[in-house]
């Protein structure tokens, strides 16, 4: 009985290895056919912003897209680069949209003079717009 157990375990291991290698053949990667150990060309980064006038909203109450690059803007607990142009005080001077009233209302309904914590990190809802083709087919909203 002790001699048959290792044989059964080796046979089971062989089946696992064989089935795993069969599954790996069907995997399709954005890397293409380049082996993981070899060097590949970096994936092209598109920095092209959307057309003038922006991209239309796809659903009701969608947060507006950001029509400019935000690569150099920082949002930390102590600073928010977006507010250099988009604060209530600077929006008119910078010709930038100011945050809506909803960004100044606390959870309990109280009004605040500053942007409330839940709305402070702009990029949790707003993303930069770009003329980029989707990497995978999307049927959302159709």
Image: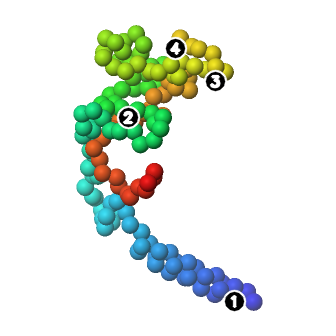
- Name the residue beneath numbered marker 1: 4
- Number of the front mark, 1 or 4: 4
- State the quadrant of the C terminus: bottom left
Q: Which is closer to the viewer, label 4 or label 2?
A: 2
Side of 74 relative to 67 (left or right): right
Q: Position of residue 103 (x, y in %)?
A: 51, 22
Upstream in sequence: badge 4 or badge 2: 2
The answer to whether mark 1 and mark 4 are in CB contact below 8 A is: no
Of the pair 20 and 99, the residue shown nearer to us: 99
Q: Tell me if mark 1 has few (under 14), some (14-19) or many (20+) residues whose alpha carbon lies within 10 angstroms of its own.
A: few
Q: Earlier in the sequence, mark 2 or mark 1?
A: 1
Colour convention of the picture: rainbow
Quadrant including the N terminus: bottom right
Q: Mark 3: few, some, or many residues within 10 Å (few <14, many ≥20)?
A: few
Along the polypeptide, which appears first: circle 1 or circle 4? Answer: 1
Judge the density around disc 2: few (<14), some (14-19), many (≥20) Cα neighbours within 10 Å: some
Give me the residue at 50% from left, 81% from top.
18
Answer above or below: position of 3 versus 88: below
Residue located beneath label 3 in the image: 107
Closer to us: mark 3 or mark 1? 3
Instruction: Residue 22: give x, y in percent of width and height.
Output: 46, 78
Q: Marks 4 and 3, Cα distance to the nearest angstrom?
A: 14 Å
Residue that numbered label 4 is attached to: 114
Measured from the top left, where is residue 28 in percent x and y? 38, 66
The residue singled out by tag 2 in the image is: 65
**Secondary-structure class at tag 2:** loop
Q: Earlier in the sequence, mark 4 or mark 3?
A: 3
Q: Residues within 10 Å of mark 4 (few under 14, many from 20)?
A: few
In the image, residue 53 above or below residue 85: below
Q: Residue at x 31, y 64 (%)?
A: 32
């Amino acid at each position: 009985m002790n001699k048959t157990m290792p044989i059964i375990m080796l046979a089971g291991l062989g089946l696992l290895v064989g089935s795993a290698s069969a599954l790996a053949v069907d995997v399709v990667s954005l890397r293409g056919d380049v082996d993981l150990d070899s060097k590949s060309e970096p994936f092209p980064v598109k920095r092209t912003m959307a057309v003038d006038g922006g991209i239309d909203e796809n659903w009701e109450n969608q947060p507006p897209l950001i029509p400019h690059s935000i690569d150099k803007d920082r949002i930390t607990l102590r600073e928010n680069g977006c507010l250099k142009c988009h604060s209530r005080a600077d929006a008119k001077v910078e010709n930038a949209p100011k945050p809506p009233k909803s960004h100044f209302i606390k959870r309990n309904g109280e009004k605040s003079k500053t942007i409330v914590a839940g709305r402070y990190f702009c990029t949790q809802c707003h993303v930069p717009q770009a003329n980029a083709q989707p990497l995978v087919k999307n049927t959302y909203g159709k």
